[in-house]
Image (cartoon, coloured by chain):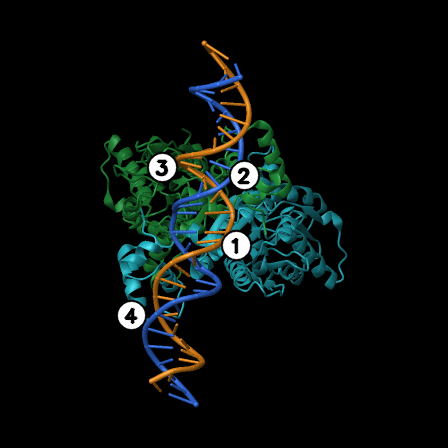
Chain colours: A cyan, B green, C orange, D blue
Amino acid sequence: MPPTLEEVAKLAGVSRSTVSRVINEHPNVRPEVRQRVWEVIRQTGYQPHAAARSLATRRTWVIGLIIPQAVTTLFTDPYFPILLRGIADVCNAHNYHLMLSLFSQRRVQNSRAYQDLLYQQVLRGRHLDGVVVSSAPLDDPIFPCLLEDNVPFVIVGRYLHERINYVDVDNVVGARMAVEHLLRLGHERIATITGPLNMCAGQDRLEGYRQALAARGIPVDENLIAEGDFSEQGGRAAMQRLLPHRPTAVFAASDMMAVGALKTLRDAGLRVPDDIALVSFDDIPLASMVDPPLTTVRQPIEQLGSTAAELLISLLENPQEETVHRIVLPTELVIRASCGVRARSL
Amino acid sequence: MPPTLEEVAKLAGVSRSTVSRVINEHPNVRPEVRQRVWEVIRQTGYQPHAAARSLATRRTWVIGLIIPQAVTTLFTDPYFPILLRGIADVCNAHNYHLMLSLFSQRRVQNSRAYQDLLYQQVLRGRHLDGVVVSSAPLDDPIFPCLLEDNVPFVIVGRYLHERINYVDVDNVVGARMAVEHLLRLGHERIATITGPLNMCAGQDRLEGYRQALAARGIPVDENLIAEGDFSEQGGRAAMQRLLPHRPTAVFAASDMMAVGALKTLRDAGLRVPDDIALVSFDDIPLASMVDPPLTTVRQPIEQLGSTAAELLISLLENPQEETVHRIVLPTELVIRASCGVRARSL
DNA sequence: CAATTTGTTGGGAGCGCTCCCAAAAAGCGG
DNA sequence: CCGCTTTTTGGGAGCGCTCCCAACAAATTG
């Protein structure tokens, strides 16, 4: 049985309240008493009981990370652990804890109801002070819920709403840079394999593609746009659909899809970058390992996580603060071989 | 302000206790009363306050996943998210929640002290009912701590101690299968790139290698053993050290290291599998994407997670149960191209 | 040196729940 | 219909903490 406040108090010859003041760093405690109390705490290994504290303060010092529907890509590339690391580091630094709500779509039958139930439990049950939401489709019902319940939250990914805080990478500009790079290399028939268009990142990267072409006065040929789902398989299939339209270059909205496209191209007897150039997005470790290494847009994943956590915590610590924060992090084009930059000599 | 038990009770015209009985499914409540109470609960959206409940029951229904020191490999391949999915699914199914404690070694200076502090807070603060520990080195101080504090826990990875429950894949047999496969293909100078030898998986896979050779009566040449760290870089370096000793085949204890080895070999002008055969361990998605696709030992990662969670929860629900569980899951050899099976026609 | 201010301490109440016990209601056999 | 058992219900106490207020001690002032 671990010691309680009261027991520590008795051992230190003071009252409950004084010990409480000591551990909460309240200034009005005589230094020698403070010292004595700390000593007893050290000796007994006392730790305040989290539940008791939460009950009294109505705070849990726990934040949640919610991944509403587990997009497959979460489990095939290391985006997720890196994001998590960013979040976890910040939590550690601020003495918050991190609770994870993952909803894989295993139990398909009633996954929706199920998820709602859990949501209720976790959030209404006041398990959490606030949440970070990642990889949610734009129309996920969780957002209205969170707003209504007045749960402080931050989205990883863009979401336009007057009261919603988010952190995102600049998908539009990143995609534009990628396509501009291809344009600069002389390509004009540039195709794109998009992400899922119900997700913001999918939409934004397509928008960047459109902007880059528009800036050069090149009309968008809808035949050169194939929707994928960020996965390798999706990329493979999309590339197949693109092939008949004979693009000279492809911008894939994720590295995984680029890897898929690479397969399709290889099977079709086309060489990258000689016959067709390829640029993608994400810069996951795999990007530099495939042959040819991918030219791709790097996003600061870990920073995305840490910024989101930092923002959420500041929201929690300053509840009166009403400003809505929308943070956009820059991306960077990493030039490797798949774009053919060397072959064509920039 | 969310409603409390007492408020629900008033609305339903019963007492606090009765509502408590209803939500805890205690049998002795008149059906019509039970019905009426549920109705009020539904209408008000009542959810019991987690902290209050924990305080009274001394249970939190939260389990922790602790990754004591963030091995880099966690962030470069998707092992971790898949394990997490296994754990999360089981938690969801049993109405437990999952708290994550990740310790990246960022803040190197006092990472140890820091980690202890957090450990204290989380565990002594009774935030958790039990924990799953993964990717901890054998000598991690967390194990004695957990035992002393009487925290129920399960390790992912083998750990021989009379009171410790663990779940592991059969690394020894898996590695032996891999090496036996190479032996069957006619190789005799088989090298190995091991994992870190302070981790159980590293040790066990090396042991499997030794056993396979021993069974054939082939003496182990220590020059053919190079220690790696499960990472691509480590594999690259280890292969470099192995090269002068002219193995005809290599067993790498992880796919990532195999990928690294592949690079070294390519740079050295050696072809895989024609000049040198390669077999590895893990079967991460990357394994099938590199050229040549890797022959590798598949481990049931998700099942590892779900089994560990299942075991932990059963420990929590049956605290009187004293049996120590040691669960070993089987592995499977996935034959692709890097072993040269086709070239040499088995 | 009394009066006031400031600093320090202890104890009561309460956070929202569960558990226990006793009281009330219902069921039952003779 | 009465005394008995069994089921159902309500209320007190307590889980371990924080917050507030009152009491007291110490320091400051006219």
Q: Is residue A223 left or right of residue A328?
A: right
Q: Is residue B247 visible?
A: no
2 or 3: tag closer to the N-terminus: 2
Same subunit, tags 4 and 3: no
Of C5 and A25, nearer the camera is C5
Q: Is residue A191 visible?
A: yes
- Badges 4 and 3: C-beta atoms under 8 Å apart? no
The location of residue B343, given as percent across then percent down, is 43, 34
Report how far apart the C-alphas of labels 2 and 3 lie in the structure. Answer: 49 Å
What is the three-letter code of the residue carrying label 3? Asp
Relative to A110, residue A161 above or below: below
In the rendered image, which residue does mark 2 sit on? B15
Rendering quarter of residue B166 = top left
In the rendered image, which residue does mark 1 sit on? A129
What is the three-letter code of the residue carrying label 1? Asp
Q: Nearer the viewer, mark 2 or mark 3?
A: 2
In the rendered image, which residue does mark 3 sit on? B168
Of D6 and C18, nearer the camera is D6
The subunit carrying tag 2 is: B
* Residue at 58% in and 49% down: B2
Rendering quarter of residue A264 = top right
* Residue at 65% in and 43% down: A238
